[in-house]
Image (spheres, rainbow, N blue to C red):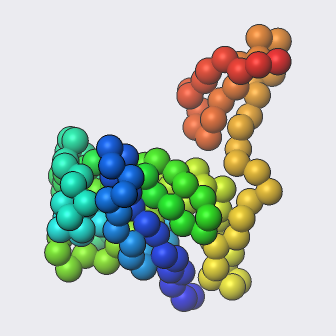
Amino acid sequence: MGATYTDVTIRNPANREREWTGKFLVDTGAFDSLVPRACLEAIGLEPQGRRSYVLADGKPITLDITVAEMEFEGEIVGGTIVYGEAEAEPLLGVTALESGGFEVDPRSQTLKRLPAVLLKTNGTRSGSYSVGAAGSTGTGAS
């Protein structure tokens, strides 16, 4: 099975003219995206917190994270980005991928646009809805 790559532009939300573009491995096994630290610092992003992760080999690790704008395949999403080591390959995680309305086509190993981004009503008359994950609810127009 081959790997899927796409060009992604990372923008500093406080100054959208500051951006960095790279070729990202689409990693459907990773929730968040990852970019080498120096690339994030070059566009003025600073860590906003730390998050614990488990690597593919099962090793736990705690890394710096930030939030930024990501643009790929003509879509713009906001998402959590992990600060990677200097030699780290940029990764596009599944959260950004699905927020943009894409999935990986397993046959062609390319990004496939979904017909729509999931926005599911919970069946109440008040117009409540959930977006993407169980328990995330809000009030929408009926």
Residue 76 vs 121, above or below: the answer is below
- Residue 77 relative to residue 60: left or right: right
**From the image, which quarter does the N terminus lie in?**
bottom right
Mark count: 0
Question: Residue at 70% across / 48% down in the picture?
Answer: 117
Q: Position of residue 97 (x, y in %)?
A: 55, 60
Instruction: Work out which residue is located at the far bottom of the displayed protein and give it.
Output: 2
Residue for point 28% across, 48% down? 66
Residue placed at 23% from the left, 52% from the top? 45
Q: Nearer the viewer, residue 41 or 88?
A: 41
| In the displayed structure image, the side of residue 137 where residue 25 appears, left or right | left
Instruction: Please identify the quadrant where the C terminus is shown.
Output: top right
* Residue sticking out furthest to the front: 17
Q: Position of residue 102 (x, y in %)?
A: 65, 62
Which x, y percent locates residue 10?
39, 61
Query: Left or right: 123 with respect to 80?
Result: right
Q: Is residue 76 above or below residue 111?
A: above
Observer-nearest of 59 and 110: 110
Which corner quadrant of the image does residue 128 belong to?
top right
Q: Is residue 124 visible?
A: no
Q: Identify which residue is drawn at 74% across, 60% down.
A: 114
Q: Is residue 22 left or right of residue 47?
A: right
Toward the viewer: 69 or 137? 69
Q: Quick check: can you spot residue 64?
A: yes
Instruction: Using the image as rendered, state which of residue 19 and residue 133 is in the foreground.
Output: 19
